[in-house]
Image: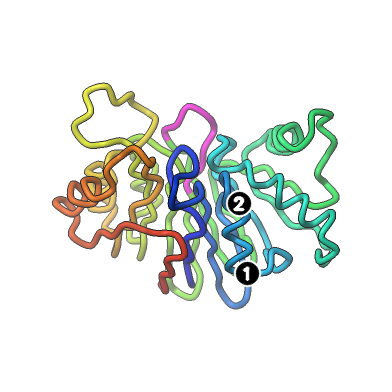
Amino acid sequence: MKLTVVGCSGSGPGPGSPASSYLVEHEGFRLVLDLGNGAFGALQGLIDPGSVDAVFLSHLHADHCLDVAPFVVWHRYSKRSPGRLVPLYAPVGAERRLAMAYDLDGDGLTDVFDFVPVGSGALTIGPFEVALARTAHPVETYAIRLTAGGRSLVYTGDTGASERVVELARGADVLLAEAAHPDGDPDQPPGLHLTGRQAAEHAAAAGVGRLLLTHIPPWVDRIAQLAAASSVFPETELVAPSGVYDL
């Protein structure tokens, strides 16, 4: 299994990165996790968009889904699309929400996507065994665990502190965890985002092999997030756009 970071900026694109998007590949199958603002441009620099086999959206906040719109434009008008429907796994209501984001008339996007509503539980996407868990976030959001070839990757999506995420990540090889809130912020609301330290505490509690920090907003000190996490869980790294991780 190979993970490539397409975009990792939290809450929106930053000066050095698009918003959240990750490419996971195994045995030639290409799964895109989230398509946040600016991610489709970066994705084109990595692969042929027509080779995407499936898309998973953790939730429907703009910084995780809005570049579905240019993905649709490319498939409709580039004359390079292979013409097959792309399965799009997302919370209930994604079809209508994304259609409205694309066009004020809200015309369907079913000429490009086969929409598959998801909830907590297990399913299969291509070669991946998949488990989903609802996270602690204001809108319906799912963390995802991908297992293939004896290796496992967990992506938190957006979440506050969550025992469900810890259980989903238990024993995983890699935890790709958001760390949007700075540590020590007294105004941090519950049930929204993790701090660097909290992400590390989740990794330690789950007994994962490695922690990758992502979704850090441009106004938050990335190095401080890394330092806070590393003090709890030494096997911690900051992801960067185009970063590649072989599991």
Query: Considering the numbered disc 1 on the image, is that residue within a helix, a strand or a loop?
Result: loop
Q: Which residue is mark 2?
A: 56
Residue at image x 61%, y 56%? 41
Query: Considering the numbered disc 2 on the image, is that residue within a helix, a strand or a loop?
Result: strand
Q: Is residue 158 left or right of residue 213?
A: right
Kind of residue sitting beneath label 2: Phe
Front one among 216 and 78: 78
Residue at image x 85%, y 63%? 79
Residue 119 drawn at (x, y percent): 58, 41
| CA neighbours of label 1 inside 10 A, class few (<14), some (14 to 19), many (20+) | few
Residue 168 drawn at (x, y percent): 40, 50
Q: Is residue 164 left or right of residue 185?
A: right
Report if residue 137 lies within the magenta region: yes
Q: Earlier in the sequence, mark 1 or mark 2?
A: 1
Image-quadrant location for residue 246: bottom left
Find the residue positioned furthest to the front. Answer: 15
Front one among 220 and 202: 220
Residue at image x 59%, y 49%? 35
Measure the alpha-carbon separation of dots 1 and 2.
17 Å
Residue 1 drawn at (x, y percent): 49, 72
Front one among 243 and 147: 243
Please say which color scheme the image uses: rainbow
Kind of residue sitting beneath label 1: Ile
**Span shown in magenta:** 136-143
Q: Which residue is mark 1?
A: 47
Per the picture, the main secondary structure of the magenta-coloured stretch is loop
| CA neighbours of label 2 inside 10 A, class few (<14), some (14 to 19), many (20+) | many
